[in-house]
Image: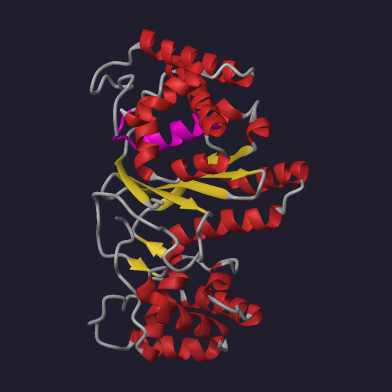
Amino acid sequence: MRTGTADLPLHHGRAPKWLFNKMVRLAGAIIEAIVIEQDRHEFLRRVSDPFWFQAFGSVLGFDWHSSGLTTTVCGAMKEGTKHISHDLGLYFCGGKGGASRKTPRQIQEVADTISLDGDRLIHASKTSAKVDNSCVQDGYNLYHHLFIFTSDGDWSVVQQGMNPDNRYARRYHWLSLGLESYVNEPHAAICCDQKQDSLNMVAADSSASRTSVTGIARDRPDKTIMEVEKILKMPDRHPLLTLDISPKYFHKILLRTYERSPADFEELIGVAGVGPKTIRALALIGELLYGTRPSFRDPARYSFAHGGKDGFPYPVDKSTYNQSIAYLESAIKRSKIGENDKMKALRKLVYL
């Protein structure tokens, strides 16, 4: 199982309408073929693998190294399956920008239709986003969140953040199958090129820090604020010494966590208002008071079939693209009536 992140340079171009229309049809056909030949859980495994996702985008004809690959491929998957979601038992919610904020409502609408526990799925969606935006402080702010789940209640997440300083985007993948904790090494494997020291509160090495941070959040706010005042008077010799959070706002959040009294770190990050600055401040206080140093290890650890949108490595071959769509759609239709010759031929490609 490979889940984790991938880094991509920012790209401001967009797929032309004629190409996106083809991407929608081909994406839908490929997803349907995977579900027919394997099952819906196999698709979750694949889409949570950053290597497979990158190759999938290349097969669809998008730039293999572009940040736009994530949003465009996710859009094509969502659009290409919307009429067959119930048949596949696969549902796509969320998207880029404003669409990502509609994710909880979209999840609940589907869950009500197929009698699933919508609250559990919404918790998974919100917590995965909170972890990658607040607990993994690598400089990338999330702007895209796609939540994919099955009629069995299993799920995968593909989300992306942007770093305007290095002009890169970072994609994060999650998979519920085999997930033991949201806040302790939730990404099973990582792949990327751009790495840097980052506050990583979900690293195994941050276990003690998570415990102390949660304990501080349950303390009386006045007690914690007194410790903050001591920290601000210390010499500037600590990597986290600068507290970029307003004392007034910090007190307000501490009052909220004190009243909520979170049982563990996962519950703490779910408290409204607890964001990156609060986590940073609590991690610093925890280290200085209890010596529980958090991890600063960055959590981050393709093939061309139809060319690329910008002509790299060669222009999209429309004729070949149309043939690929027609072949897959024909194979799917014939498999449904018991004629599996084309699907068997596709299966053989795995061994070539």
Is residue 108 something that shows in the picture? yes
Q: Identify the residue at image location x=43%, y=27%.
A: 347
Q: Identify the residue at image location x=47%, y=45%.
A: 45
Residue 234 or 86: which is nearer the viewer?
Answer: 86
Boundaries of the magenta span: 63-77
Number of dots carrying numbers? 0
Q: Position of residue 276 (x, y in %)?
A: 44, 65
Q: Is residue 286 magenta?
A: no
Which quadrant of the figure contains the C terminus? top left
Q: Position of residue 102 (x, y in %)?
A: 62, 44
Q: Position of residue 237 (x, y in %)?
A: 22, 82
Direction from residue 166 to residue 129 in the image, left or right: right
Is 205 rendered above or below residue 20? below
Magenta region, main secondary structure: helix
Direction from residue 79 to residue 73 in the image, left or right: left
Q: Position of residue 59 (x, y in %)?
A: 37, 26
Is 21 rendered above or below residue 65? above
Direction from residue 286 to residue 312 in the image, left or right: left
Q: Is residue 65 magenta?
A: yes
Rendered image quadrant of residue 220: bottom right
Colour scheme shown: secondary structure
Is 307 rendered above or below residue 295? above
Q: Identify the residue at image location x=59%, y=47%.
A: 101
Rendered image quadrant of residue 263: bottom right
Is residue 245 something that shows in the picture? no
Residue 341 or 196: which is nearer the viewer?
Answer: 341
